[in-house]
Amino acid sequence: AKSLGKNTYKKYEQKMKQHYDEYLLIEYYLPIARQNDEFELYFQPKLDLTTNSINGMEALLRWDHPILGNVPPSKFIPIAEETGHIIKIDEWVLKKACLQNKKWSEGMFQIPLRVAVNISPLHFRHPNFVNMLERVLKETNLEPEFLEIEITENTVIDNIEECIACVVKLREMGVIVSIDDFGTGYSALSYLKNLPINCLKIDQSFIKEIAKNIGDIAIVKAIICLAHEMGLKVVAEGVEEKETLECLNELGCDEIQGYYVSRPMPSSEFEKKIIRG
Ligand code: C2E
Ligand code: CA
Ligand code: CA
Ligand code: CA
């Protein structure tokens, strides 16, 4: 039993060390990723269920490092938040997304698309955030209604007063604001009544099994009802199957996003498939 304990410990120690090394490598390489041109923006379309057409897309960051390979955002975003680099990274994403959308909007026959950008909680609370966003809109010349900011529910709940002030300013500018991962926060719904947002994005965890799970149906139905009563649009994310789409359509969901419509794509592919259609 003693040696088994020792072996188990050794394995555990190795695992810990791997995690630690990976963390350190990411922490080390992340600050120079932007200069070295290792970041790329992918775009995932949003399908409007009422018109059955693409009306926007979410910008998602990808990091391809020469040694580490493709590092997923779930790994590097938390580290970027801890080290504070997220401020610069979000700004880069915002600028890139606005520029790209401006360019696409100029070559479009139909109505321009709305581009959604994720803003980390730390950044959203930064005193300079609204000024930075205003500057980027000015520099890129994008109409504010074609920019959407996604903030998570926990961003709001952690600091309701400041958050309301910030959302009010964004809305005055004409920027669209959405609550991301809705339903996974501490679920103190009361914040909703004072927050002038446009849209709720229901978290994937409620969507995945909706066609089979009565509990999920009930929750999604309630969220859609709540949102519509408050004049908000509802987006479902993580839609991978036709049955899921059909179920959401029946429940009156406004927009969907997920692999069923398309995976996130590099800008060149998005342009070919969505913009030129
Ligand atoms: P999120 O904002 O909730 O983004 C949705 C995630 O779900 C994305 O993962 C997307 O690729 C994935 N997804 C979309 N459709 C499906 C589907 O049908 N099935 C499944 N299983 N997954 C789907 P991704 O790109 O790995 O991003 C993960 C998270 O990292 C994001 O979650 C967001 O919180 C964060 N993130 C990504 N890009 C940025 C960024 O530019 N800035 C900040 N601050 N955070 C970002
Ligand atoms: Ca998002
Ligand atoms: Ca989400
Ligand atoms: Ca998420």
Image (spheres, rainbow, N blue to C red):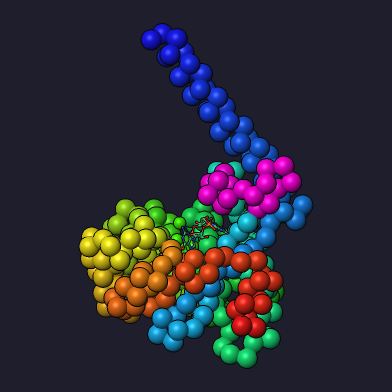
Between 125 and 69, the one nearer to me in the picture: 69
Q: Quadrant of ligand 4?
A: bottom left
The answer to whether any part of residue 16 appears in the image is yes
Image point (46%, 62%), residue name: 151
Image point (36%, 69%), residue name: 244
Image point (30%, 66%), residue name: 211
Left of 247 or right of it: where is 51?
right
Depicted 30 relative to depicted 233: above or below: above
The answer to whether any part of residue 156 appears in the image is no
Residue furthest to the top in view is 2
Left of 46 or right of it: where is 234?
left
> Where is the C terminus found, in terms of image quarters?
bottom right
> Where is the N terminus found, in terms of image quarters?
top left
- Image spot of residue 45 (x, y percent): 53, 73
Left of 78 or right of it: where is 180?
left
Between 50 and 106, the one nearer to me in the picture: 50
Residue furthest to the bottom in view is 109
Number of numbered markers: 0
- Image spot of residue 80 (x, y percent): 59, 47
Query: Is residue 93 highlighted in magenta?
Result: no
- Image spot of residue 52 (x, y percent): 45, 84
Residue furthest to the right in view is 36
The magenta region covers 63-81
Left of 185 or right of it: where is 93?
right
- Image spot of residue 9 (x, y percent): 47, 18
**Picture quadrant where residue 188 is located:** bottom left
